Amino acid sequence: MPSLLSLLCILLSLFSFDTSALAASQANMSEIDRQALLCFKSGISFDPFGILHSWSNGSLNFCSWKGVTCGKKIPPRVVSLDLTSARLGGRLSGCVGNLTFLSLMNLADNYLPGTIPGELGKLPNLHTLNLAGSNLEGNIPESLGTSNSLSYVNLANNSLTGGIPVSLANSVSLSTLILSRNNLSGEIPSVLFDNSSKLTVVDLQKNSFTGPIPHFHTVTTLKFLCLTENFLSRSIPPSLGNVSSLSSIFLGQNRLSGLIPETLSHITKLLELDLSFNSLSGSVPSSIYNMTSLRYFSVGSNTLVGQIPSHIGYSLSNLQLLILGSNRLKGLIPASLANMLNL
Protein backbone atom coordinates (compact mmCIF):
# COMPACT_ATOMS: atom_id res chain seq x y z
CA MET A 1 0.00 0.00 0.00
CA PRO A 2 1.56 3.36 -1.06
CA SER A 3 2.63 5.73 1.67
CA LEU A 4 1.18 9.22 2.12
CA LEU A 5 4.43 10.70 0.86
CA SER A 6 4.36 8.66 -2.37
CA LEU A 7 0.71 9.68 -3.02
CA LEU A 8 1.67 13.32 -2.55
CA CYS A 9 4.52 12.92 -5.03
CA ILE A 10 2.14 11.36 -7.59
CA LEU A 11 -0.37 14.25 -7.17
CA LEU A 12 2.37 16.85 -7.52
CA SER A 13 3.67 15.21 -10.68
CA LEU A 14 0.17 15.17 -12.17
CA PHE A 15 -0.33 18.83 -11.26
CA SER A 16 3.03 19.68 -12.80
CA PHE A 17 2.03 17.83 -15.97
CA ASP A 18 -1.32 19.69 -16.17
CA THR A 19 0.25 23.12 -15.69
CA SER A 20 2.96 22.32 -18.22
CA ALA A 21 0.37 21.18 -20.73
CA LEU A 22 -1.68 24.34 -20.12
CA ALA A 23 1.36 26.56 -20.55
CA ALA A 24 2.25 24.78 -23.78
CA SER A 25 -1.32 25.18 -25.06
CA GLN A 26 -1.33 28.89 -24.22
CA ALA A 27 2.03 29.41 -25.89
CA ASN A 28 0.75 27.61 -28.96
CA MET A 29 -2.29 29.95 -29.21
CA SER A 30 -0.06 33.01 -28.98
CA GLU A 31 2.27 31.54 -31.59
CA ILE A 32 -0.68 31.17 -33.97
CA ASP A 33 -1.24 34.94 -33.74
CA ARG A 34 2.46 35.69 -34.19
CA GLN A 35 2.67 33.51 -37.29
CA ALA A 36 -0.50 35.10 -38.70
CA LEU A 37 1.08 38.55 -38.34
CA LEU A 38 4.30 37.38 -39.98
CA CYS A 39 2.25 35.87 -42.79
CA PHE A 40 0.48 39.21 -43.24
CA LYS A 41 3.87 40.94 -43.39
CA SER A 42 5.08 38.50 -46.06
CA GLY A 43 2.39 39.84 -48.37
CA ILE A 44 3.65 43.42 -47.97
CA SER A 45 6.30 44.41 -50.52
CA PHE A 46 6.46 48.16 -49.87
CA ASP A 47 6.88 49.78 -46.44
CA PRO A 48 8.24 53.33 -46.93
CA PHE A 49 7.97 54.33 -43.26
CA GLY A 50 9.47 51.10 -41.92
CA ILE A 51 6.34 50.43 -39.88
CA LEU A 52 6.83 46.67 -40.05
CA HIS A 53 10.55 46.63 -39.23
CA SER A 54 9.74 45.63 -35.65
CA TRP A 55 7.83 42.63 -36.98
CA SER A 56 10.76 40.22 -37.07
CA ASN A 57 10.74 36.45 -37.04
CA GLY A 58 13.14 36.49 -34.09
CA SER A 59 10.89 38.69 -31.95
CA LEU A 60 8.49 36.75 -29.73
CA ASN A 61 6.86 39.81 -28.15
CA PHE A 62 4.46 40.51 -31.02
CA CYS A 63 2.26 42.60 -28.72
CA SER A 64 4.90 45.34 -28.90
CA TRP A 65 4.97 45.42 -32.71
CA LYS A 66 3.80 48.67 -34.28
CA GLY A 67 0.12 48.68 -35.11
CA VAL A 68 -0.59 45.62 -32.95
CA THR A 69 -2.58 45.68 -29.70
CA CYS A 70 -3.12 42.64 -27.50
CA GLY A 71 -5.78 42.00 -24.90
CA LYS A 72 -5.05 41.92 -21.19
CA LYS A 73 -5.89 38.25 -20.70
CA ILE A 74 -3.43 35.36 -20.64
CA PRO A 75 -2.27 34.12 -23.06
CA PRO A 76 -1.77 37.36 -25.05
CA ARG A 77 -3.93 37.50 -28.18
CA VAL A 78 -4.16 40.19 -30.86
CA VAL A 79 -7.34 42.29 -30.51
CA SER A 80 -6.46 45.23 -32.79
CA LEU A 81 -4.51 45.67 -36.03
CA ASP A 82 -4.31 49.37 -36.94
CA LEU A 83 -2.00 50.35 -39.80
CA THR A 84 -4.04 53.19 -41.26
CA SER A 85 -2.23 55.56 -43.64
CA ALA A 86 1.00 53.55 -43.40
CA ARG A 87 1.33 53.59 -47.23
CA LEU A 88 1.94 49.88 -47.25
CA GLY A 89 2.01 48.19 -50.63
CA GLY A 90 1.29 44.57 -51.42
CA ARG A 91 -1.68 42.32 -50.85
CA LEU A 92 -4.00 41.57 -47.96
CA SER A 93 -3.33 37.97 -46.99
CA GLY A 94 -6.05 35.62 -45.80
CA CYS A 95 -3.70 34.69 -42.95
CA VAL A 96 -5.32 37.42 -40.86
CA GLY A 97 -8.26 35.05 -40.58
CA ASN A 98 -6.24 33.19 -37.93
CA LEU A 99 -6.38 36.19 -35.56
CA THR A 100 -9.47 34.81 -33.89
CA PHE A 101 -9.53 37.38 -31.06
CA LEU A 102 -9.27 40.35 -33.43
CA SER A 103 -12.00 42.95 -32.84
CA LEU A 104 -10.63 45.88 -34.89
CA MET A 105 -8.88 45.93 -38.26
CA ASN A 106 -7.99 49.30 -39.77
CA LEU A 107 -5.90 49.17 -42.93
CA ALA A 108 -7.37 52.29 -44.54
CA ASP A 109 -5.32 54.38 -46.98
CA ASN A 110 -2.80 51.80 -48.07
CA TYR A 111 -2.09 50.19 -51.45
CA LEU A 112 -3.37 46.63 -51.29
CA PRO A 113 -4.64 45.73 -54.78
CA GLY A 114 -6.48 42.45 -54.89
CA THR A 115 -9.60 41.03 -53.35
CA ILE A 116 -10.89 41.14 -49.79
CA PRO A 117 -10.08 37.77 -48.18
CA GLY A 118 -13.19 35.78 -47.37
CA GLU A 119 -11.47 34.65 -44.18
CA LEU A 120 -12.27 38.03 -42.60
CA GLY A 121 -15.90 37.02 -42.34
CA LYS A 122 -14.93 34.04 -40.20
CA LEU A 123 -13.33 36.12 -37.43
CA PRO A 124 -15.71 35.51 -34.50
CA ASN A 125 -14.91 38.72 -32.60
CA LEU A 126 -14.40 41.24 -35.42
CA HIS A 127 -16.35 44.41 -34.61
CA THR A 128 -14.75 47.11 -36.80
CA LEU A 129 -13.46 46.64 -40.35
CA ASN A 130 -11.98 49.65 -42.16
CA LEU A 131 -10.37 48.98 -45.53
CA ALA A 132 -11.22 52.33 -47.13
CA GLY A 133 -8.92 53.77 -49.79
CA SER A 134 -6.77 50.66 -50.18
CA ASN A 135 -7.18 49.99 -53.93
CA LEU A 136 -9.13 46.79 -53.33
CA GLU A 137 -11.02 45.17 -56.18
CA GLY A 138 -13.35 42.29 -56.86
CA ASN A 139 -16.55 41.42 -55.01
CA ILE A 140 -17.43 41.96 -51.36
CA PRO A 141 -17.16 38.50 -49.77
CA GLU A 142 -20.48 36.89 -48.88
CA SER A 143 -18.84 35.68 -45.67
CA LEU A 144 -18.77 39.20 -44.18
CA GLY A 145 -22.48 38.91 -43.57
CA THR A 146 -22.15 35.69 -41.60
CA SER A 147 -20.43 37.42 -38.66
CA ASN A 148 -22.57 38.02 -35.59
CA SER A 149 -20.17 40.64 -34.21
CA LEU A 150 -19.40 42.90 -37.20
CA SER A 151 -20.80 46.37 -36.50
CA TYR A 152 -18.73 48.86 -38.54
CA VAL A 153 -17.82 48.24 -42.20
CA ASN A 154 -16.03 50.88 -44.26
CA LEU A 155 -14.92 49.81 -47.75
CA ALA A 156 -15.14 53.26 -49.37
CA ASN A 157 -12.80 54.60 -52.08
CA ASN A 158 -11.81 51.30 -53.64
CA SER A 159 -12.58 49.61 -56.97
CA LEU A 160 -15.00 46.98 -55.70
CA THR A 161 -17.47 45.48 -58.17
CA GLY A 162 -20.58 43.34 -57.99
CA GLY A 163 -23.41 44.01 -55.58
CA ILE A 164 -24.01 44.20 -51.85
CA PRO A 165 -24.15 40.62 -50.52
CA VAL A 166 -27.62 39.85 -49.18
CA SER A 167 -26.01 38.28 -46.13
CA LEU A 168 -24.29 41.59 -45.30
CA ALA A 169 -27.46 43.61 -45.91
CA ASN A 170 -29.31 41.22 -43.62
CA SER A 171 -26.73 41.34 -40.82
CA VAL A 172 -28.25 41.65 -37.36
CA SER A 173 -25.14 43.28 -35.86
CA LEU A 174 -24.38 45.91 -38.53
CA SER A 175 -24.65 49.58 -37.48
CA THR A 176 -22.47 51.41 -40.04
CA LEU A 177 -22.16 50.50 -43.73
CA ILE A 178 -19.95 52.74 -45.89
CA LEU A 179 -19.43 51.53 -49.46
CA SER A 180 -19.16 54.89 -51.21
CA ARG A 181 -16.97 55.60 -54.25
CA ASN A 182 -16.66 52.11 -55.69
CA ASN A 183 -17.93 50.41 -58.85
CA LEU A 184 -20.75 48.49 -57.17
CA SER A 185 -23.86 47.79 -59.19
CA GLY A 186 -27.19 45.98 -59.15
CA GLU A 187 -30.11 46.73 -56.88
CA ILE A 188 -29.81 47.66 -53.22
CA PRO A 189 -31.00 44.53 -51.35
CA SER A 190 -34.53 45.00 -50.08
CA VAL A 191 -33.60 43.50 -46.71
CA LEU A 192 -31.14 46.33 -45.93
CA PHE A 193 -33.87 48.46 -44.37
CA ASP A 194 -36.09 45.59 -43.33
CA ASN A 195 -36.42 45.13 -39.54
CA SER A 196 -33.01 46.66 -38.85
CA SER A 197 -32.67 47.59 -35.20
CA LYS A 198 -29.02 48.78 -35.15
CA LEU A 199 -28.31 50.42 -38.50
CA THR A 200 -27.33 54.10 -38.03
CA VAL A 201 -25.26 55.03 -41.12
CA VAL A 202 -25.67 53.92 -44.75
CA ASP A 203 -23.41 55.61 -47.32
CA LEU A 204 -23.59 54.17 -50.84
CA GLN A 205 -22.85 57.32 -52.85
CA LYS A 206 -20.95 57.34 -56.15
CA ASN A 207 -21.59 53.80 -57.31
CA SER A 208 -23.74 52.37 -60.11
CA PHE A 209 -26.71 51.02 -58.18
CA THR A 210 -29.91 50.71 -60.17
CA GLY A 211 -33.55 49.94 -59.47
CA PRO A 212 -35.74 51.35 -56.71
CA ILE A 213 -34.88 52.57 -53.25
CA PRO A 214 -36.02 49.73 -50.94
CA HIS A 215 -38.95 50.25 -48.62
CA PHE A 216 -38.27 51.09 -44.99
CA HIS A 217 -39.97 48.86 -42.46
CA THR A 218 -39.00 48.72 -38.80
CA VAL A 219 -35.96 51.00 -39.00
CA THR A 220 -35.59 52.85 -35.71
CA THR A 221 -31.95 53.98 -35.46
CA LEU A 222 -30.93 55.18 -38.95
CA LYS A 223 -29.51 58.72 -38.82
CA PHE A 224 -27.53 59.15 -42.05
CA LEU A 225 -28.65 57.96 -45.50
CA CYS A 226 -26.60 58.87 -48.59
CA LEU A 227 -27.46 57.36 -51.99
CA THR A 228 -26.15 60.27 -54.09
CA GLU A 229 -24.74 59.74 -57.61
CA ASN A 230 -26.16 56.38 -58.55
CA PHE A 231 -28.74 55.33 -61.15
CA LEU A 232 -31.65 54.72 -58.81
CA SER A 233 -35.07 55.06 -60.40
CA ARG A 234 -38.79 55.08 -59.64
CA SER A 235 -40.28 57.09 -56.82
CA ILE A 236 -39.05 57.90 -53.33
CA PRO A 237 -40.76 55.39 -51.02
CA PRO A 238 -43.21 57.16 -48.66
CA SER A 239 -42.09 54.73 -45.94
CA LEU A 240 -38.87 56.76 -45.71
CA GLY A 241 -40.90 59.24 -43.70
CA ASN A 242 -41.42 56.61 -41.01
CA VAL A 243 -37.73 56.70 -40.06
CA SER A 244 -38.05 59.36 -37.38
CA SER A 245 -34.40 59.01 -36.31
CA LEU A 246 -33.01 60.43 -39.57
CA SER A 247 -31.02 63.65 -39.54
CA SER A 248 -29.58 63.51 -43.10
CA ILE A 249 -31.10 62.31 -46.38
CA PHE A 250 -29.06 62.61 -49.61
CA LEU A 251 -30.75 61.21 -52.73
CA GLY A 252 -29.42 63.66 -55.32
CA GLN A 253 -28.06 62.86 -58.80
CA ASN A 254 -30.14 59.78 -59.50
CA ARG A 255 -33.07 59.06 -61.84
CA LEU A 256 -35.86 59.32 -59.30
CA SER A 257 -39.28 60.38 -60.54
CA GLY A 258 -42.77 60.98 -59.21
CA LEU A 259 -43.83 63.19 -56.32
CA ILE A 260 -41.90 64.20 -53.23
CA PRO A 261 -43.56 62.23 -50.40
CA GLU A 262 -45.40 64.42 -47.92
CA THR A 263 -44.37 61.89 -45.26
CA LEU A 264 -40.81 63.29 -45.25
CA SER A 265 -42.16 66.18 -43.16
CA HIS A 266 -42.85 63.67 -40.36
CA ILE A 267 -39.10 63.42 -39.67
CA THR A 268 -38.95 66.13 -37.03
CA LYS A 269 -35.17 65.95 -36.48
CA LEU A 270 -34.20 66.19 -40.15
CA LEU A 271 -31.33 68.63 -40.74
CA GLU A 272 -30.32 67.89 -44.34
CA LEU A 273 -32.51 66.99 -47.32
CA ASP A 274 -31.04 66.78 -50.83
CA LEU A 275 -33.27 65.59 -53.68
CA SER A 276 -31.56 67.57 -56.47
CA PHE A 277 -30.75 66.45 -60.01
CA ASN A 278 -33.55 63.94 -60.43
CA SER A 279 -36.82 63.95 -62.40
CA LEU A 280 -39.17 64.69 -59.54
CA SER A 281 -42.47 66.33 -60.50
CA GLY A 282 -45.41 68.05 -58.86
CA SER A 283 -44.99 70.64 -56.16
CA VAL A 284 -42.98 70.58 -52.97
CA PRO A 285 -45.40 69.52 -50.18
CA SER A 286 -46.34 72.56 -48.12
CA SER A 287 -45.55 70.66 -44.92
CA ILE A 288 -41.89 70.39 -45.95
CA TYR A 289 -41.69 74.18 -46.10
CA ASN A 290 -42.67 74.09 -42.40
CA MET A 291 -39.84 71.80 -41.23
CA THR A 292 -38.15 74.16 -38.79
CA SER A 293 -35.29 71.71 -38.17
CA LEU A 294 -33.91 71.95 -41.73
CA ARG A 295 -30.46 73.48 -42.25
CA TYR A 296 -29.83 72.22 -45.79
CA PHE A 297 -32.61 71.96 -48.38
CA SER A 298 -31.95 71.25 -52.06
CA VAL A 299 -34.49 70.21 -54.68
CA GLY A 300 -32.80 71.95 -57.63
CA SER A 301 -32.70 70.53 -61.16
CA ASN A 302 -36.01 68.65 -61.18
CA THR A 303 -39.32 69.42 -62.91
CA LEU A 304 -41.11 70.82 -59.87
CA VAL A 305 -43.94 73.34 -60.26
CA GLY A 306 -45.80 75.69 -57.95
CA GLN A 307 -44.76 78.73 -55.96
CA ILE A 308 -42.36 79.41 -53.14
CA PRO A 309 -44.50 80.10 -50.04
CA SER A 310 -44.43 83.71 -48.89
CA HIS A 311 -43.73 82.60 -45.30
CA ILE A 312 -40.64 80.48 -46.13
CA GLY A 313 -38.28 82.93 -44.43
CA TYR A 314 -40.11 82.45 -41.13
CA SER A 315 -40.92 78.73 -41.26
CA LEU A 316 -37.41 77.76 -42.42
CA SER A 317 -35.54 80.46 -40.56
CA ASN A 318 -32.65 78.13 -39.63
CA LEU A 319 -31.70 77.30 -43.22
CA GLN A 320 -28.05 77.68 -44.19
CA LEU A 321 -28.44 76.48 -47.77
CA LEU A 322 -31.46 76.66 -50.08
CA ILE A 323 -31.41 75.40 -53.69
CA LEU A 324 -34.60 75.56 -55.75
CA GLY A 325 -33.14 76.46 -59.16
CA SER A 326 -33.67 74.75 -62.53
CA ASN A 327 -37.30 73.82 -61.92
CA ARG A 328 -40.61 75.23 -63.22
CA LEU A 329 -41.51 77.38 -60.25
CA LYS A 330 -43.57 80.52 -60.77
CA GLY A 331 -44.43 83.65 -58.84
CA LEU A 332 -42.46 86.10 -56.75
CA ILE A 333 -39.34 85.53 -54.69
CA PRO A 334 -40.65 85.99 -51.12
CA ALA A 335 -39.39 89.02 -49.22
CA SER A 336 -39.36 86.86 -46.08
CA LEU A 337 -36.11 85.29 -47.31
CA ALA A 338 -34.42 88.27 -45.70
CA ASN A 339 -35.35 86.71 -42.35
CA MET A 340 -32.99 83.76 -42.99
CA LEU A 341 -30.02 85.19 -41.13
CA ASN A 342 -28.00 81.95 -41.42
CA LEU A 343 -28.52 81.52 -45.16
Image (cartoon, rainbow, N blue to C red):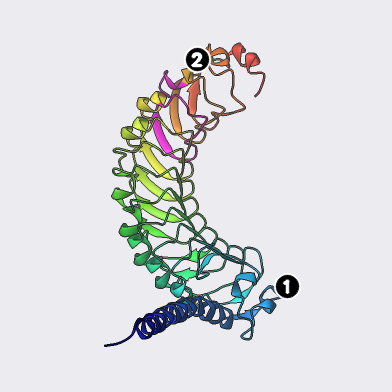
Quadrant of the drawing holding the C terminus: top right
Q: CA distance from mark 1 to mark 2?
A: 59 Å
Horizontal arrangement in the rendering, residue 47 relative to residue 261 (left or right): right
Residue at numbered disc 2: 309
Instruction: Residue 59: say if magenta.
Output: no
In the image shown, does 220 or 299 lie closer to the viewer? 220
Q: Position of residue 163 (x, y in %)?
A: 37, 61
Total tally of numbered discs in the picture: 2
Q: Tag 1, which secondary structure?
A: loop
Residue at numbered disc 1: 49
Q: What residue is rendered at 34% in x and 65% in y?
A: 142
Q: Position of residue 191 (x, y in %)?
A: 29, 49
Quadrant of the drawing holding the N terminus: bottom left
Label number found at residue 121: none
Nearer-N-terminus badge (1/2) = 1
Q: Is residue 254 above or below residue 90?
A: above
In the image shown, does 86 or 313 lie closer to the viewer? 86
For the record, the magenta segment spans 267-288
Q: Amino acid at mark 1?
A: Phe
In the image shown, does 230 or 295 lie closer to the viewer? 295
Q: Please rate how many residues cluster around mark 1, counting C-alpha atoms within 10 Å: few if below 14, some from 14 to 19, many from 20.
A: few
The secondary structure that most of the magenta stretch takes on is: loop
Q: Is residue 105 above or below residue 326?
A: below
Q: Tag 2, which secondary structure?
A: loop
Q: What residue is rendered at 43% in x and 53% in y?
A: 151
Horizontal arrangement in the rendering, residue 173 relative to residue 65 (left or right): left
